[in-house]
Image (cartoon, rainbow, N blue to C red):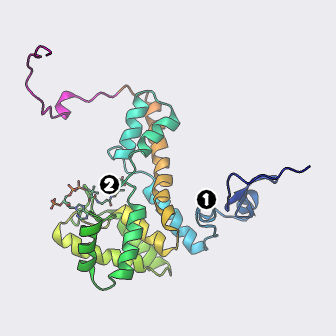
Amino acid sequence: GEVIVEPLIRTTISDDRGEEPRYVGYAASELCEKGYGIEDVIGLLWNKKLPSKEESEIIKRIIMISADHGPAVSGAFGSIIAACAGIDLPQAVSAGMTMIGPRFGGAVTNAGKYFKYGVKEYPNDISGFLSWMKQNVGPVPGIGHRVKSLKNPDKRVKYLVDYVKNHTTLHTPCLDYALEVEKVTTAKKDNLILNVDGTIGCILVDLDFPEYSLNGFFVLARTIGMIGHWIDQNNQNSRLIRLYDYLINYAVKEEREVPEKK
Ligand code: ACO
Ligand code: LMR
């Protein structure tokens, strides 16, 4: 007779049982045929919705602008060190990926989450929000940058804010709130700007992407850059990296004799 078993997993996003994958019901080839792009596939697989044309244009820009930020940042540097150690592409990229976290690139989700919380709980009280954050969270995710500041603004942030606010009809309560927070934090210290993580987190909240999906945008975008760095190092036959002594502050004990073991 028929054996009935409990399913092991449940999926709500994709199905490959036909001739080709369907993303939330839509055949992949039909999406291609009808002119949809990668940003629409992201909308389907991460938010189960086809974005509007205007929303797709925003998503595309978020990915383009976050794809790379040079070799010096934690993620690219991790992948470059791995590439130079002869590590294969997937593992070298995942070495860089490992760096994405609360300080670098992985603050998007919490930026979206806490700025949204601010809009709801401290709508006209930025200093109340900042005190709550200080007491309950710590550094505000999405605020602060090691090298960008009021004097050296982050063009990526300026571009995205201008694009969303002046070239789309998106309603931006979360982004507006974060920009108000930035006014207060930069008055304290000029590098406490709204950073890329904070900007994309807020725009994605305003686009109604689920909170858990937000870091995915940085991860996806930066994968493009990390793969690029791996290819670049391999093309150049780069050698193993070993830090020069002058790059290390050896704050260690003087050389001394090992005592006899008791
Ligand atoms: N909220 C509140 N205060 C902050 C914040 C913040 N987000 N960031 C820094 N500060 C304060 C620190 O408390 C410190 O104050 P103090 O001098 O009174 O002790 C001062 O600014 C300097 O802090 P550092 O951590 O030394 O600053 P640094 O330049 O090294 O930090 C960083 C840069 C890691 C991005 C930091 O601003 C931060 O943690 N921000 C939140 C996380 C975040 O958004 N990361 C994403 C960055 S963008 C990207 O990676 C793509
Ligand atoms: C990035 O996009 O990697 C950053 O903004 C971090 C940095 O230090 O440049």
Q: Nearer the viewer, residue 174 or 77?
A: 174
Task: Give the mark, 1 or 2, whose residue is nearer the N terminus.
Answer: 1
Disc 1: CA contacts within 10 A as few (<14), some (14-19) or many (>=20): few
Location of the C terminus by quadrant is top left
Residue drawn 38% across and 25% down? Answer: 239
Q: Is label 1 in a helix, a strand or a loop?
A: helix
Residue 157 in percent (x, y) is at 36, 66
Pointer 1 residue? 38
Residue 24: name its quadrant: bottom right
Seen as rendered, the residue at the extreme front is 262
Which region of the structure is painted magenta? 241-262
Alpha carbons under labels 1 and 2: distance apart: 28 Å
Seen as rendered, the residue at the extreme right is 1
Residue 150: name its quadrant: bottom left
Does residue 191 appear left or right of residue 235 in this picture? left
Q: Are marks 1 and 2 in contact (CB under 8 Å)?
A: no
Pointer 2 residue? 103
Residue drawn 23% across and 74% down? Answer: 131
Q: Is label 2 in a helix, a strand or a loop?
A: loop
The amino acid type found where label 1 is placed reads Ile
Residue drawn 75% across and 57% down? Answer: 29
Seen as rendered, the residue at the extreme top is 260
Any atom of ligand 1 within 8 Å of the CB at mark 2? yes
Q: Is residue 100 above or below residue 79?
A: below
Does residue 111 appear left or right of residue 2 in this picture? left
